[in-house]
Amino acid sequence: MLEVNTISRKLKIAFVLDRYLPSRGGESYFSWLAKELVSRGHEVHIFATIGEKIRGTEYQLHQIPVLRYPHSLRIFSFLRNSAHAVQQYDFDIIHGVGRTLAMNIFNPHGGVEKAYLKQDFCSITNRFYYVYKFLKRYLSLQHYVKVWIQRRQYVNDKVRKIIAISPMVKEDIVRYYGVPEEKIAVVFNCVDLGRFHPKNRTIFRKAKREDLGIDDSALLLLFAGNNYRLKGLEPLLHSLIYLKRWFLNRPFYLLIVGRGPIGRYMAMARKLGVSDFTLFLGPVKGMEQYYAASDIYVHPTFYDSCSLTVLEALASGLPVITSRFNGAVDVIISNKGGKILENPADVEDLANSIAFYFDEERRKEAQVVARQWMERHSPTSNVEETLRVYYEVAGGMRT
């Protein structure tokens, strides 16, 4: 097989996605990938309804006009106008991410809609809210528009290759849409291994813990997510009841960061009797400092195509507890660096998995093992594997 770094042919590449706002955290991967591709001499264009140009970058940004309301017409206008926009250029690669059909490579970063929906409903414990969500979803025209588009994306002769960001996503694509396995390439998610590193414990841990008001002798569990229900915060709060009972003389805290209905979950923590050792911070910046301050990362998600926070935590040397419905589990090879839950709603199993890493020696071992796992999935490998797919679709390699 030819290595990507032996290829001299330069490609003209388009990314098509709905929103492109890397400074706010969204689409940061594509901002990084665009810069990496430009640095290798490729021409990169980004097409989006809303976009921002990052200073010092050399890719071209194009705005796609859309109808704002109703939402279904917005989706259709994006389909039509994105197709028209990219047709004005002669691209080798059109890398589609969101609800577009103007592409020869499809990259469903959010995973498979049908798989997500199944697990989203599994995360609902209130039966009245379940009925409300069910009716809202399946009586909505928008739902059927989304399902129609995704089927067209997977069963589409113009799409030469599908890039899945984890083996789990690939399996879901095959299961729900019958796409031949050879049409799907897995290019595993990646994170900045320099920014997220065990050495950050030495740099940030003491100051961040002082800022949080947490003594160094206390064990700190970390949860990060912007959809508390889907990411499993409710079973995590319930698991603290077990941990409180098992470790009467071992001080510990759960730190919760990210956007969500904080008031509702604070009330839940009070009702469960665990509010004294839960801290809700909301959205934060500088996540590497919070990993450094923490001892165990807990992400009992009901669905994640490939959680970046799990990868960041592992790269930072934290043991991770997550579920089999997270594409990131492919990194976790043994319990030396992480535990995989069969059912994120199984509160006692979740508590047992967390308790496993209350042992200091196991956490020390995880600092080494988890980091080694992540070094096999470097950003450089991600770019090279992406380029292999690009050259295959573009019709061959020149050396």
Image (spheres, grey):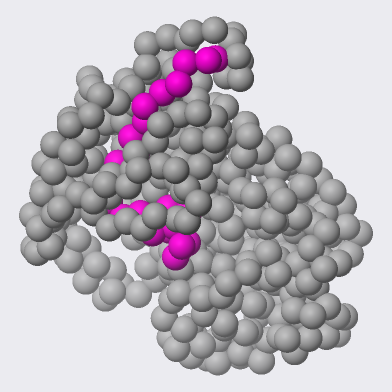
Q: Position of residue 286 (x, y in %)?
A: 63, 69
Split into 4 quadrants, where in the image is the N terminus? top right
The answer to whether residue 132 is left or right of residue 207 is: left
The residue segment tinted magenta is 7-28
The quarter of the rendered structure image containing the C terminus is top right
Q: Position of residue 324 (x, y in %)?
A: 55, 47
User: Which quadrant would residue 351 be assigned to in this image?
Assistant: bottom right
Q: Could you tell me if residue 81 is visible in this image?
A: yes
Label count reads 0
Q: Nearer the viewer, residue 115 or 93?
A: 93
For residue 24: magenta? yes
State yes or no: residue 286 in magenta.
Answer: no
* Extreme residue toward the right, this view: 361
Which quadrant holds residue 149? top left
Depth check: give the residue in front, 334 or 42. 42
| In the displayed structure image, the side of residue 32 where residue 153 appears, left or right | left
Query: Above or below — where is 102 with respect to 393?
Result: below
The reply to whether residue 302 is visible in this rendering is no
Q: Residue at x 35, y 43 (%)?
A: 60
Q: Position of residue 190 (x, y in %)?
A: 59, 43
Residue 264, percent from left and from top? 43, 86
Identify which residue is drawn at 17% across, 66% down. 136
Q: Which residue corresponds to the image point at 55% horizontal and 42% vertical from the top-left?
A: 189
Q: Looking at the picture, does residue 66 appear above or below residue 360?
A: above
Asked where in the image residue 378 lies, by quadrant, the reply is top right
Residue drawn 51% across the image and 88% down it: 266
Residue situated in front as seen by the camera: 162 or 235: 162
